Image (spheres, rainbow, N blue to C red):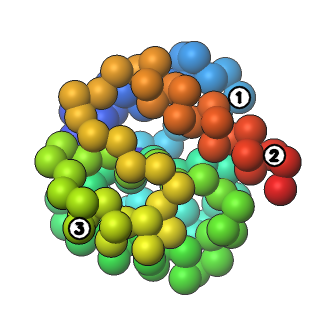
Amino acid sequence: MGGEVDGRVLFTRMARRWQAIKVLVAPTGRTGLRIATERRLGLVVVHAALPDTDAVDFLAGVRARGLSPSVPVVVIAHEGSSAERARFLWAGASAYVLTPLRVDEVDRAVGMLLEAAAVR
């Protein structure tokens, strides 16, 4: 989920490559939290710069409201410091990817995470 235009383009391209993935794009963190808690998701992609919510708080909230630890969460960030990366990983992120993004890079990360989740 994410709100930025480049995120939407990325998610649309991912959906085309991964036919089994239904992409839901939430324009805000509040909407994303509602979607994540109401639906049984198999993968969550979070943009680190959510427009209305601290993305780390969003991720912690999603995990606290019942998102299984086996569900992979990919965080996409523009400027990632090691401290920010650590905050996301402690909050429950499975992967942290910096922009500029290449679809094949994210595709590879998502594929590995979905494979690992299927084994659990």
10 Å neighbourhood of mark 2: few (<14), some, or many (≥20)?
Answer: few
Q: Nearer the viewer, residue 7 or 107?
A: 107
Residue 66 drawn at (x, y percent): 64, 77
Kindly identify which residue carries mark 1: 20
Q: Residue at x 52, y 26 (%)?
A: 107
Amino acid type, mark 3: Ala
Instruction: Specify whether residue 33 is in view.
Output: no
First of labels 2, 1 by sequence position: 1
Q: Nearer the viewer, mark 1 or mark 3?
A: 3
Residue 35 against residue 66 in the figure, above or below: above
Residue 48 against residue 64 in the figure, above or below: above
Q: Residue at x 24, y 34 (%)?
A: 99
Check whether the beta carbons of the residues at disc 2 and disc 3 lie within 8 A of each other: no
Check whether the beta carbons of the residues at disc 1 and disc 3 lie within 8 A of each other: no
Real-space Cα separation, disc 1 to disc 3, in angstroms:
34 Å
Element class at badge 3: helix
Element class at badge 1: loop
Element class at badge 2: helix
Amino acid type, mark 1: Ala
Q: Residue at x 47, y 50 (%)?
A: 95
Kindly identify which residue carries mark 2: 118
10 Å neighbourhood of mark 1: few (<14), some, or many (≥20)?
Answer: few
Kindly identify which residue carries mark 3: 83
The residue positioned farthest toward the front in the image shown: 82
Residue 116 drawn at (x, y percent): 73, 46
Q: Nearer the viewer, residue 85 or 12?
A: 85
32 with respect to 69 (left or right): left
Quarter of the view holding residue 82: bottom left
